[in-house]
Amino acid sequence: MNKCINLCQSLFSFEFFNGCVILEPLLPTLKFKRRYIAVEVLSNINVSRETFIRSVFSNSCSFLGDAGVAKSGLSVLGFENNKGIIRCNHKFVQKVICALSLITNIDGSDAIVKIAGVGGTIKSTNKKLVR
Amino acid sequence: MAEYVKKTVDCIYPSALFGDFFKNVPKTLNDFGYSDVVLLTNDSTNKLIDSYEQLKKNETEIKIPEIHRCFEIVSENPQEIHNLLRKHRSSYDLLCVRSNKEKSIRAAVENERNDFIIPTVFDRPGLINQVVAKAARDNSIAFAFEMLPLLKLRGYKRVKYIECIRLMLPSLNKYDVPIIFMTGAKSQTDLRDQISLSSFGFLLDFDIYSSEKCISSLGKIINENLSRKSGKTVADGITVEMSESGEFD
């Protein structure tokens, strides 16, 4: 019995994992909640995914700052046919929407970013895009 | 008392209705979520507005935003502001004053015929002080803030604009002065939807309910003016009611 205990202790010891500390997973209440923003680009040209991501991040950084964009957890999930979904932290939804609405120019041509809706899941925001 | 129907209203210039960017402007305004649109004009016979109303008659399938005309007074002379307000009160749905001088804002606030003021102040937030806010509350005059400078300006100037509005808000909130958010669009590419306009309120530390209230406060003013024009309201709190036979009670 003592040998088993010693084996277990050695397996899960600090030295066994070569100095790696095992972190416990975060509790669900401590994780930040995500919101998904359905977005439609109104423009005379067909906007590609790369140009859209570049313009979103450049405008957001100039408005919210690098630290603000990092705090908001902003990321573009998908973008096709001038419609897409953007993910962010639930506390920063309105600031991200404000940053998106300040976009006036994408790839040299005039553009308006219209907010179709905000949802808690990708499925619900997809429905708003389809509408 | 007339029932109040909540309206989401945007205030734009007539040049924003026409151009090549949108094919169907009434449909896009409907998609953006506006029930009414206020047009700022200086001209009593505006051909652009008449041609939009022609467009509206042709469209029958979708609900098109209603148009209200607003005469915009841009003047630094207080006497001229009083004269223009007296002259145009009966012929327009709304009246507004746009200014960045202390004398003209004071004159606009003290005149009851005025509906709202657009302060174009970028470096002197002290123009809207407690005296001005109290007079605005007594005469039920609103203050409107535009989103257009946020789109056009960059860097330090944009920061200064937001900072000026933030410094004006405490004196306005203390006396419960109604606040209006508007795009102030001068071209089609300046138009923004209702959700983007309400997010402007979050920049200024408003919550959801107060920012929605700011978008619909112009609608309340329009309803009051329409009921006053129809002859049903004599003064605040006093309404005229007719019986079914058509006689006054």
Image (tube, coloured by chain):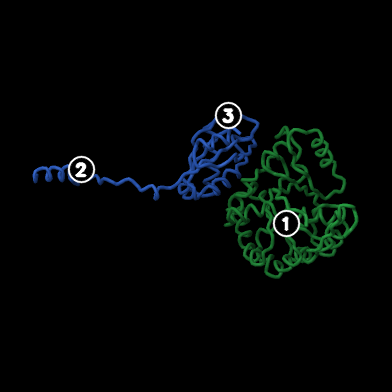
Chain colours: A blue, B green
Q: Position of residue A91 (x, y in %)?
A: 49, 50
Mark 1 or mark 3, whichever is nearer to me: 3
Give the spatial CA distance, label 2 vs label 1. 67 Å
What amino acid does circle 1 point to?
A: Ile
Instruction: Identify the residue position indicated by label 3 in the image.
Output: A81
Crowd rating for badge 2 (residues with CA inside 10 Å; few <14, some 14–19, many 20+) = few
Tell me, yes or no, whether dots 1 and 3 are on the same chain: no
Picture layout, residue A6 above or below residue B242: above
Q: Position of residue A25 (x, y in %)?
A: 32, 45
Crowd rating for badge 1 (residues with CA inside 10 Å; few <14, some 14–19, many 20+) = many
In the picture, measured across the screen, residue A46 lies left or right of residue B217, that is left
For the view shown, which residue lies furthest in the bottom direction?
Answer: B131
What amino acid does circle 3 point to?
A: Asn
Q: Place residue A47 in its image quadrant.
A: top right
In the picture, measured across the screen, residue A81 lies left or right of residue B178, that is left
Quarter of the C terminus of chain B within the rendering: bottom right
> Chain for mark 1?
B
User: Mark 3 vs mark 2: which is more N-terminal?
Assistant: 2
Marks 2 & 1, CB-CB < 8 Å contact: no
In the picture, measured across the screen, residue B246 lies left or right of residue A77, that is right
Crowd rating for badge 3 (residues with CA inside 10 Å; few <14, some 14–19, many 20+) = few
Quarter of the N terminus of chain B within the rendering: bottom right
Q: Which mark is residue B118?
A: 1
Q: Which mark is residue A18?
A: 2
Q: Place residue B62 in its image quadrant.
A: top right
Q: Which mark is residue B76?
A: none
Q: Element type at marker 1?
A: strand
